[in-house]
Amino acid sequence: MWTRARTNRSRSDLAAVAEEAAASGCPAVRLAGLSKDYGTGPATVHALRDVSLEVWPGEFVVLLGPSGSGKTTLLNLVGGIEKPSAGRIEVAGTDIAGLDEKARTAYRRARVGFVFQFFNLVPTLTALENVAILAELTGPDAGEHSRAALASVGIVQAADRFPGQMSGGQQQRVAIARAIVKEPPLLLCDEPTGSLDLDTGRQVLGVLRALAMEGHHTVLLVTHNSAIARMADRVVWLRSGTISREERVAAPLKAEDLRW
């Protein structure tokens, strides 16, 4: 079980944890009989119903489906933002479904990076400072590690700029750097290109794909854009809270070759 003390690991320790999880032989994520309900009685909404899924370390998995199909709910459950109504959520072999709030917070800090459609950057902080907010949770040398994260997504040249001085694509890269600075095994992305144009969206997707190809980052990406599925390792379709089908992509496209 994760505890608050675990969030004080150094960046190198966290990277080792990610590598260990990737080499463990366990799925990065295993969902078994997962359900999530909102409300009670006749007004109950069944957001997810008896969902089972395995995702392996280093996989780039795209979750597709219409609004209300349960995609974001699934992401929130895997990320420890919400608790399931029933079922198991195993991350690297450990069931997180029963964790209390304190332990789920520690889990999110140590093992999960979130990337959203809206960048959620602090407007009064520079790119470097926005990333350092998360880097400070992993131990010393936050500035050094933050610059390294910005460099890994090709945006270190904007380290001293404020969000208002950057394009949408640059801001999303900063958001990705913030998500990966603690070396999380899991990257959970909710419509990360939803507010970007085609060229900028492809650049951001290329960064996420490269992170998965490193081998110890597992990427789950929620989108309405079916074109993005062509660059995935696997596509999972959801409808009415259940998985309607899965498909492995035989020859994933490069992000630069996507069209929509």
Image: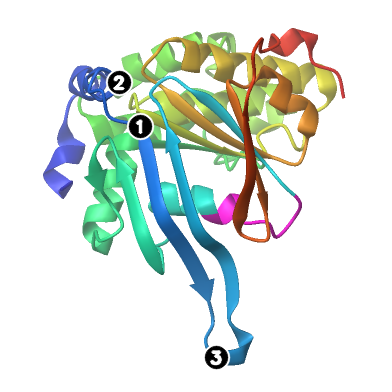
In the structure shown, which secondary structural element does the residue marked by tag 2 occupy? Answer: helix
Distance, label 2 to label 3, CA atoms, is 42 Å
> Is residue 79 visible from the viewing direction of this image?
no
Magenta highlight: main SS: loop
Q: Is residue 120 magenta?
A: no
Instruction: Tell me the kind of residue under disc 2.
Output: Ala
The image quarter containing residue 88 is bottom left
CB of mark 2 within 8 Å of CB of mark 1? yes
Q: First in sequence: mark 2 or mark 3?
A: 2
Residue at 76 percent of width and 41 percent of height: 224
- How packed is label 2: few (under 14 Cα within 10 Å), some, or many (20 or more)? many
Alpha-carbon span between mark 2 and mark 1: 7 Å
Residue 149 on image: x %, y %: 43, 16
N-terminal of the two: label 2 or label 1? 2
Q: Residue 217 sits in which quadrant?
A: top left
**Residue located 55% across and 56% down the image:** 73
Query: Which stretch did the figure color magenta?
Result: 66-73
Q: Is residue 212 left or right of residue 148?
A: right
Question: What amino acid is at disc 3?
Answer: Gly
Label at residue 22: 2
What amino acid does circle 1 point to?
A: Ala
Label 3 vs label 1: CA separation? 35 Å
Label annotation for residue 41:
3
Residue 40 position, x and y percent, is 52, 87
Crowdedness of circle 3 by 10 Å Cα count: few (<14), some, many (20+)?
few
